[in-house]
Amino acid sequence: MTDNPQSILSHIEELRWRIVKVGIAVVIGAVVAFFFATPLREILEAPFYAAAPGNDFQALKVGEEWGVLMRIAVFGGVILASPIILYQIWAFINPALTARERKWALPTVASLVVLFVGGVLFGYAILPRGLEFLLGIFENVENNLLIGEYYSFVLRFLLAFGAAFLYPVFLFAAAAAGVVDSGQLARGRRWAIILVVVGAAVITPTGDLLTLLVLAVPLYLMYEITYWLVRLVLKK
């Protein structure tokens, strides 16, 4: 295959159009999510009511509820547009890959989407436990939270989980490109454990050891699965 080097300006121009396409996809997804804001609110607020029954939300600013509505719409837009977002990222780096590496395009993008959505769902599943810990430190304190601050915390929490679950694909892609091999991954297990625990602690700033372990264990298992895929599928 003939390699056609491009100038920095052409790369910047391509990046700009990729970002525009991502923005359009998110806006379209956000418009769709806007019309489902009520059921989305019920889903996103369910962990709070499960963790702090008898408490409720309050808004102390005139535009706070509108801001929450926009966050819900954008969050839904990101989830709906995630296949396009991840494809555009892959398409941008695709010209730098060899023909052998490009054959992994479809499974790579599909894996990214599945892992991102799976990470968000996994984060949602353990969110009630984290909230229960954070909101139950002082028994005599009412947990009538500001709705804007709650959504800021929850949406960052869920998106962080989605992003954290993407790393095995990039690790596998690095192995496919010859950057790392199974031997290096095997020797790096101790470092992987440390990085996984630190990453889990950053993503789950609850101070709850159980919540941290619930995230750290699957993240490390994905490292092991990636190691065996590199060893058995790529034979590196």
Image: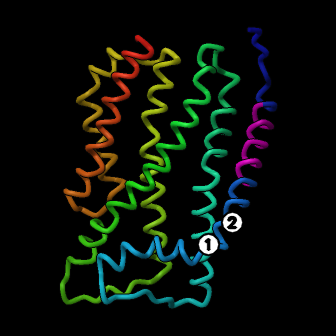
Which span is picked out in magenta? Answer: 11-23
57 relative to 194, above or below: below
Location of residue 45 (image quadrant) = bottom left
Residue 54 pos. (x, y %):
31, 89
Q: Main secondary structure of the magenta part?
A: helix
Residue 211 coordinates in the image, percent (x, y): 25, 57
Of residues 9 and 91, the one drawn nearer to the viewer in this rendering: 91
Q: Nearer the viewer, residue 42 or 116?
A: 42
Left or right relative to 43: residue 77: right
- The answer to which image quadrant residue 141 occupies is bottom left
Please state which amino acid type lies under the numbered disc 1: Phe
Q: Which residue is mark 2?
A: 32
The residue positioned 44% from the left and 37% from the top of the image is 167
Residue indicated by mark 1: 36
Asked if the residue at tag 1 contacts the one at tag 2, i.e. Cβ–Cβ closer than 8 Å, the answer is: yes
Query: At 44% across and 49% down in the image, what residue appears?
Result: 118
